[in-house]
Amino acid sequence: MGQKVSPIGLRLSINKGWQSRWFASKGYDKLLKEDIIIRNMIEEQLGNAGISKIEIERTEEEVKVDMYTSKPGVVIGRRGATINDIRDSIEKKTGNIIQLNIMEIKKPELVARLVAEGIASQLEGRVSFRKAMKKAVSLCMKAGAKGVRIQCSGRLGGAEMARTEWYREGRVPLHTLRANIDYGFTEANTTFGKIGVKVWIYLGDIILDEEEMKKSRQPDKGSKKEEKV
């Protein structure tokens, strides 16, 4: 049997980046706990804002938080009231200076987590799971995806026994490391219990040119000069 691995974690440093970018020689556990607190507070207060991911960078003076959302107006609020309240609450909780940046997502149909949240909201609204999955697949392919796979697990349609159903269109090469695959997971809280929704979206291959490969293999000439001096 094949072991299931997160497509994002498998491609870190190949064509995916880390969502927390900082270094700490001491107090690593405290900073990691702060990152979790920041993400949880933002997701609790902005659950309906269409946030796909939260990236955190740390310096000696402040903490930079980038929020990628499909609804920037909901995040900002009237005259920036919502985002200011979130910033103040995070600063009180962590004791650090917080810089919040809002990044707009222009094509939410190509973001796996947002697609999964859309399906979950439809399932909570008692929409047929097959209808929701097929509609999401067609919207992703129309938006420009090269392949989509959507999977729902749980008591689908109120059945007594839980089962798994999935739909796929196009190519989804999970074993190809150069493939740019976005993965998202969420849960729908229905009257029959929780239903897990997983989404894989294949956006094409990321191939480095020969010049870029040579640059990545060879050390910078500027660093050699500095060492000689």
Image (tube, rainbow, N blue to C red):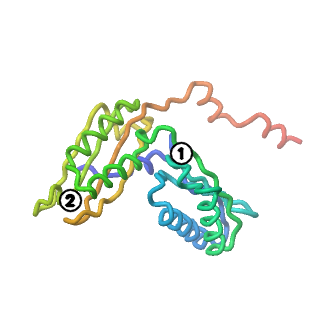
Residue 27 found in image quarter = bottom right
Is 41 left or right of 151, judged from the image as shown? right
Mark 2 element type: strand
Is 123 left or right of 25, judged from the image as shown? left
Query: Which residue is denoted by mark 1 in the rendering?
Result: 13
Kindly identify the residue that appears in the image at 45 percent across and 60 percent down.
47
Mark 1 element type: loop
Tell me if mark 2 has few (under 14), some (14-19) or many (20+) residues whose alpha carbon lies within 10 angstroms of its own.
many
Is 43 left or right of 222, judged from the image as shown? left
Q: Residue furthest right?
A: 229
Q: Look at label 1 and name its amino acid.
A: Ser
Kindly identify the residue that appears in the image at 61 percent across and 29 percent down.
212
Q: In front here: 166 or 8? A: 166
Q: Which mark is residue 98?
A: none
Q: Residue 17, percent across and down?
A: 54, 47
Kindly identify the residue that appears in the image at 59 percent across and 61 percent down.
82
Of the two numbered discs 1 and 2 in the rendering, the one whose residue sits closer to the viewer: 2
Residue 186 found in image quarter = bottom left
Q: Residue furthest front?
A: 78
Q: Which mark is residue 154?
A: 2
Pointer 1 or 2: first along the chain? 1
Q: Look at label 2 and name its amino acid.
A: Gly
Q: Vertically, is 31 above or below 228? A: below
Total residue callouts: 2
Q: Residue 8, percent across and down?
A: 44, 48
Tell me if mark 1 has few (under 14), some (14-19) or many (20+) residues whose alpha carbon lies within 10 angstroms of its own.
few
Q: Residue 104, percent across and down?
A: 56, 44
Q: Vertically, is 225 above or below 103? A: above
Q: CA distance from mark 1 to mark 2?
A: 34 Å
